[in-house]
Image: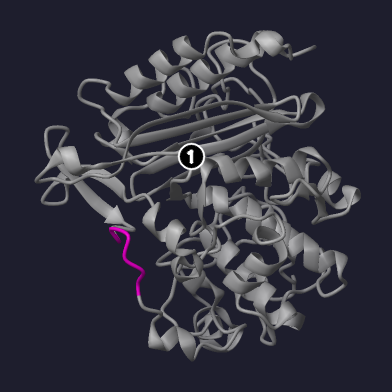
Amino acid sequence: MSDSAFSNRADLNQRLEAILHTPGAELASLAVVIYAQGRIQYEGFFGYRWIDPQHPEHSLPVTAQTRFRVASISKLVTALAIMQLIERGLLALDADVSDVLGWRLRNPHWPEIPITPRMLLTHTSSLRDGGPYTFPPHVTLREVLSSDSLPDGNSLYFAGPVPYRNQAPGHYFSYCNLGFGVLGTLIESASGERFDRYVDRHILQPLGLDASFHVCNLSDEGIRNLATLYRRQRNGVWDASAPWVAQVDDLRGVRPAEPEALRRYRPGDNGTIFSPQGGLRISARDLIEIMKVFLHEGEGHDRRGMPVRLLRPESVRQMLTVQWRFDPRIGNGDPYGGLMRAWGLGVHLLTNAPADAYGLSDRLLNGESPHLWGHTGDAYGLLGALFFEPQQDVGFVYLIGGVGRDPETYKGVYSAFYRWEEEIQSAIWGAIGEHIVD
């Protein structure tokens, strides 16, 4: 990529600002960061991290320091933590997780098949989001999922046999948030640490990041710069003319008290309380530091610029090797409306497959598109993505802090992404794509 890659910064700013103010589909906020050639090439921050409904002039803008709850982009960090423990010999990719959890985790319909970390990372474990996938501190995961808790052999949290489809563990892809709750609990059982504290000590703090899966772990500055996530709704119903309604993290700069039940929590009982599937609070700029760990085979840098190795190169290469690919001939998974057609170890690959009977295309662009690794996020009004291409050492992050219209009524034109995302992705790649070396 040449130094002139972002000579059109003003054009990109204008395009992103226009997306933010789409009539009838406005966004509360937007952060975009683009990385290439070993450095951040572009940053754009639009809208407000906190909106004052009574006095809009007092609303607080999004900045480079704004931290968002980034939804399922969080899964990339949980996957890094699992791979660290595998390197340390405390977990094994293809071993029965029951041996570490301390209780028997089995699909009651296939009790002879162990569930493994590889299955959980690739969403092929046969677990399902059949109900809530986070549980309060006094509930143990064993109570919800262990064989002893399922005397009748039925649970909404497990797939069952169906004609012409092998849903046994290890065979069928079905995107599952609960699986990452199990992985968070597995991290606790293997390390002896609370999930949030393990990730802070072994991933986020070594990179010098003021980020965490637990809000109370953020610095005072991190709390002050936390984005509230919004939707435009009236009485719980989407309404593009309604005021912005806070959905999560409406702290207004005030640090919440640590819940008493959490202080008594025993690691290994229920890692879902820290939302390993989606609860990471982090800025778009700092997500680039997570991206670099993938781009540079496990090595990142701390705030002083000193190298920090989080994983061995072979571990990252394994994560970025396709473990499951959708095959429409045999129907070996649910491609999530067409968006999810290939998966590594906790990492999503865009394949640019055409639309078919199973869903829309997973293309980034309306036309020839790059094959990118990364993850998307969608929760509480946030939409976002982190995508990268290791061979070119390039990638980007975008985070939307609230949508003003029901996303299900604002579908993409050419892909399974929502229309805002198509427009943002096209704007980003239009700024950098012509400078990528084939």
Nearest the viewer among 265 and 147 is 265
The kind of secondary structure element at disc 1 is loop
Left or right: residue 324 versus residue 164 is: right
In this view, the residue farthest toward the front is 304
Query: Is residue 255 on the magenta stretch?
Result: yes
Residue where numbered disc 1 is placed: 64
User: Residue at horizontal 68%, vertical 52%?
Assistant: 122
Residue 11 coordinates in the image, percent (x, y): 46, 9
Q: Quadrant of residue 199?
A: bottom right
Residue 126 coordinates in the image, percent (x, y): 61, 61
Residue type marked 1: Ala
Left or right: residue 231 versus residue 375 is: left
Q: How is the image coloured?
A: one colour
Left or right: residue 403 versus residue 14 is: left
User: In this figure, what is the number of numbered marks?
Assistant: 1
User: Residue at horizontal 34%, vertical 36%?
Assistant: 29
Quadrant housing the C terminus: top right
User: Residue at horizontal 22%, vertical 44%?
Assistant: 51
Quadrant housing the N terminus: top right
Q: Is residue 108 visible?
A: no
Q: Is residue 290 above or below residue 259?
A: above
Residue 353 coordinates in the image, percent (x, y): 63, 23
Q: Quadrant of residue 134?
A: bottom left
Query: Is residue 9 on the magenta stretch?
Result: no
Q: Is residue 285 above or below residue 103?
A: above
Residue 128 coordinates in the image, percent (x, y): 52, 61
- Which SS does the magenta portion mostly show? loop
Is the residue marked by circle 1 packed among few (<14), some (14-19), or many (20+) residues within 10 Å?
Answer: some
Question: Which span is picked out in magenta?
Answer: 251-256
Q: Quadrant of residue 409?
A: top left
Q: Is residue 321 visible?
A: yes
